[in-house]
Image: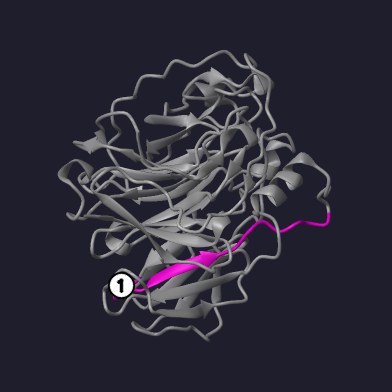
């Protein structure tokens, strides 16, 4: 889909690179104490929707209201140094270990806000993340490719073998193994997000082929093209309800200091280039690659809204329901997983961004907080990731590090 570009937004005030040292500040997950839960604004209630999962990361809602949850985590590769800071950080955050590699189905048949049916829907996958249903075909985005499965409404398990319709470059820098997939408006195209293999192409730009991008394909896997590029790690993907314009949440680069570079959400232009790895927030050149590609820097697009540096903004869902108060309708909820490259923890919350006329209409607001247990020791209870809206207008939030799903409802 080709969207009419909005006027380019202003570049936010940003410090010079290296004004502060690059930090190593991995959080330690301590788990939720009995009776404790995240906090939402007045007028909302937070309840435990499901627990006992194995690193639940992402959702897909089926037409009958069933909730699919992908369970996967980083897996240590043979060439990884087990004593490296990144690996040690993954261990502390519970992101590293044996991956469940499955999708679980949750069904709340009586509509009481708690699923009474839990079934293993698909297993034997390869770090599954995004899921999408088009007609009677369910698509699953593994880290190394997209699989298509036959789906029949109401079934609680798929036994059929998946058909691989697209190969993808596997793995990636830190947690850039995630691959999201969405059905585009009208059901004519699928969109697949692929994160970079590196921080700033330190292994060579040839390693980034078909990466740091949103790919567009036909439903049978053919017709692949790069829809947008220069997006270091795009994960959340949704279409703004009023305009139908694609938006994504992107994790920006590391090791330039505490306040660089802000993660962001942005509308996505067909054929747009968003700077990575050569520049950020438009034409601000990364000092590590200065002068290498002035042609790409010159056409780099300024993203729409900064979301804070090193927040690991992953989840993105526009609110389409009417159960929440009016001011939330049409706005965007963003799951900020939290990162390691800031001296003080940032992220570890769900952010709300109000929208009007298809654009952010105000600053981001804390919506779901309380994930940080002890800031001085970098201890957290959990880490929010994917977000989904249930048919009743409540929100689900995947707390992967705590193996839980939270439900937020208006009261």
With 17 as the anchor, is 181 left or right in this view? Answer: left
The outermost residue toward the front is: 35
Local SS, label 1? loop
Give percent across and percent down for residue 72.
59, 63
Q: Main secondary structure of the magenta part?
A: loop
Rate crowding at label 1 as few (under 14), some (14 to 19) or many (20 or more) other CA atoms within 10 Å.
Answer: some
Give percent across and percent down for residue 217.
45, 58
Q: Closest to the observer: 377 or 269?
A: 377
Q: Closest to the observer: 395 or 138?
A: 395
Relative to 164, say whether 74 is above or below: above
Considering the image in quadrants, where does the C terminus appear?
bottom left
Give percent across and percent down for residue 308.
47, 30
Instruction: Identify the residue at image location x=56%, y=82%.
Output: 161
With 203 as the anchor, is 340 left or right in this view? Answer: left
Residue 233 visible within the image: no
Report the span colored magenta: 62-78
Q: Closest to the observer: 59 or 168?
A: 59
Q: Closest to the observer: 97 or 405?
A: 405
Residue 88 visible within the image: yes
Q: How is the image coloured?
A: one colour
Relative to 3, say whether 218 is above or below: below
Give percent across and percent down for residue 2.
31, 44
| 134 drawn magenta | no
Residue at which label 1 appears? 65
Q: What count of labels does the image hold?
A: 1
Instruction: Identify the residue at image location x=51%, y=66%.
Output: 70
| Residue 260: quadrant of the picture | top right
| 65 drawn magenta | yes
Instruction: Identify the residue at image location x=23%, y=64%.
Output: 392
| Residue 71: quadrant of the picture | bottom right
With 262 as the anchor, is 77 left or right in this view? Answer: right
């Amino acid at each position: 889909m080709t969207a009419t570009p909005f006027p380019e937004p202003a570049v936010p005030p940003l410090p010079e690179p290296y004004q502060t040292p690059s930090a190593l500040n991995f959080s330690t997950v301590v788990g939720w104490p009995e009776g404790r839960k995240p906090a939402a604004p007045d007028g909302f209630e937070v309840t435990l929707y499901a627990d006992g999962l194995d690193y639940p990361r992402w959702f897909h809602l089926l037409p009958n209201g069933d909730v699919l949850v992908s369970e996967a985590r980083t897996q240590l590769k043979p060439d990884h140094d087990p004593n490296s800071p990144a690996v040690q950080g993954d261990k502390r955050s519970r992101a590293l270990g044996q991956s469940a590699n499955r999708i679980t189905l949750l069904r709340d048949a009586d509509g009481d806000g708690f699923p009474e049916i839990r079934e293993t829907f698909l297993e034997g996958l390869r770090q599954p993340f995004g899921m999408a249903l088009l007609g009677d075909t369910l698509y699953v985005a593994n880290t190394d490719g997209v699989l298509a499965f036959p789906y029949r409404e109401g079934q609680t398990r798929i036994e059929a073998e998946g058909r691989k319709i697209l190969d993808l470059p596997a793995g990636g820098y830190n947690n850039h193994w995630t691959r999201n997939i969405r059905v585009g408006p009208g059901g004519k195209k699928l969109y697949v997000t692929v994160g970079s293999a590196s921080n700033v192409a330190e292994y060579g730009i040839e390693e980034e082929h078909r990466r740091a991008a949103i790919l567009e394909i036909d439903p049978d896997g053919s017709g692949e093209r790069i829809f947008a590029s220069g997006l270091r790690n795009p994960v959340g993907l949704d279409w703004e309800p009023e305009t139908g314009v694609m938006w994504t949440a992107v994790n920006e680069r590391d090791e330039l200091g505490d306040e660089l570079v802000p993660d962001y959400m942005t509308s996505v232009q067909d054929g747009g280039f968003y700077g990575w790895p050569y520049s950020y927030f438009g034409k601000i050149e990364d000092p590590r690659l200065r002068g290498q590609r002035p042609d790409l820097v010159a056409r780099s697009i300024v993203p729409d809204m900064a979301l804070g540096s090193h927040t690991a903004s992953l989840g993105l869902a526009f609110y389409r329901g009417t159960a929440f108060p009016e001011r939330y309708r049409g706005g965007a909820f963003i799951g900020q997983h939290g990162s390691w490259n800031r001296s003080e923890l940032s992220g570890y919350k769900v952010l709300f961004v109000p929208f009007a006329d298809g654009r952010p209409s105000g600053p981001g607001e804390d919506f779901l907080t309380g994930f940080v247990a002890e800031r001085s020791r970098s201890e957290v209870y959990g880490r929010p990731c994917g977000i989904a809206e249930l048919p009743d207008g409540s929100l689900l939030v995947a707390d992967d590090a705590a193996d839980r799903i939270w439900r937020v409802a208006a009261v």
